[in-house]
């Protein structure tokens, strides 16, 4: 019998739907009844995680705990969260419930270790970078993390807040040349993989037509882990 996935959502709404969609599309199922049951709690009122990490906003912890408790009460066997920065608060939440929360940065680090990666670049929001989430997870597996410099980080932030979150979809509007320069610089520093550690970054990269086997989408990694934890199988090639 398949376990029920609980998705702590609303951070943001599109990321919540994206994670759910990836789980569905990657599950090897021939009928409705063979798909994994999911419960989604999309609380868009959870305060901004990046602002909170940077000390400029309200803590999201009370609302995240409330969401986790609702999911548990509704019958979820475990919880996944699409938002990267939200994982900074997972240690404060998991002790309030009796079901596990899959740690996305941890799952990414495990994958890179399996791939034999020794150094990985992290593209993320200021909050995720400041939190050290991915740096700490990678370090636990003996992988060195590298980051854009301050000016490059501003360009990365512009992709998230200045383009994707504002609904831009025309590739001509995006700073493709600057991003390819950042990728080249990080590669020259020895980065063997590039983590797109913000839910908006894979969208931006897709719009700009940037593709590489070195790009790692943590949401995909999380979806695969959720499918495995639920006891289902992935479609071949997914």
Image: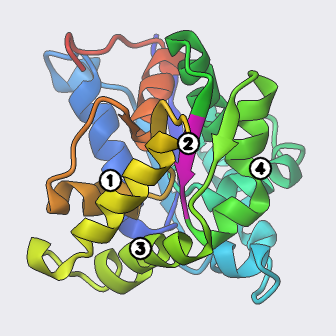
Q: CA distance from mark 4 to mark 2?
A: 31 Å
Q: How is the image coloured?
A: rainbow
Q: Which residue is denoted by mark 1 in the rendering?
A: 202
What x and y, as percent, mark residue 24? 27, 33
Mark found first going from the N terminus, 1 or 4: 4
Q: CA distance from mark 1 to mark 4?
A: 23 Å
- Which of the two discs, 4 and 2, sits closer to the camera? 2
Q: Which residue is denoted by mark 4 in the rendering?
A: 90
> Over which residues does the magenta segment extend?
120-124
Query: As displayed, is residue 170 above or below residue 141?
Result: below
- Residue 189's disc number: 2
Mark found first going from the N terminus, 2 or 3: 3
Asked if disc 1 and disc 3 are in contact, CB closer than 8 Å, the reply is no
| Mark 4 neighbour class, 10 Å CA radius: few under 14, some 14 to 19, many 20 or more | some
Query: As displayed, is residue 77 above or below residue 235?
Result: below
- Residue 160's disc number: 3
- The local secondary structure at tag 4 comes to helix
Main secondary structure along the magenta-highlighted residues? strand
């Amino acid at each position: 019998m398949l376990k029920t996935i609980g998705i702590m959502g609303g951070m943001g709404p599109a990321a919540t739907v994206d994670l759910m969609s990836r789980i569905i599309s990657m599950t090897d199922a021939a009928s409705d009844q063979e798909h994994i049951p999911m419960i989604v709690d999309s609380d868009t009122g959870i305060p901004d995680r990046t602002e909170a990490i940077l000390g400029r906003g309200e803590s999201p912890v009370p609302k995240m705990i409330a969401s986790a408790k609702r999911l548990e009460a509704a019958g979820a066997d475990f919880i996944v969260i699409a938002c990267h920065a939200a994982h900074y608060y997972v240690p404060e939440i998991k002790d309030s419930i009796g079901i596990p929360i899959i740690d996305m940065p941890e799952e990414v680090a495990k994958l890179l270790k399996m791939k034999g990666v020794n150094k990985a670049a992290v593209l993320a929001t200021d909050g995720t970078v400041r939190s050290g989430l991915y740096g700490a997870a990678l370090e636990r597996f003996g992988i060195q993390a590298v980051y854009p410099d301050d000016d490059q980080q501003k360009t990365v932030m512009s992709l998230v807040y200045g383009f994707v979150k504002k609904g831009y979809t025309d590739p001509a509007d995006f700073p493709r040349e600057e991003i390819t320069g950042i990728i080249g610089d990080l590669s020259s520093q020895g980065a063997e993989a590039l983590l797109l550690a913000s839910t908006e970054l894979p969208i931006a990269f897709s719009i700009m037509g940037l593709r590489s086997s070195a790009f790692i989408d943590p949401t995909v990694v999380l979806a695969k882990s959720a499918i495995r934890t639920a006891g289902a199988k992935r479609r071949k090639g997914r």
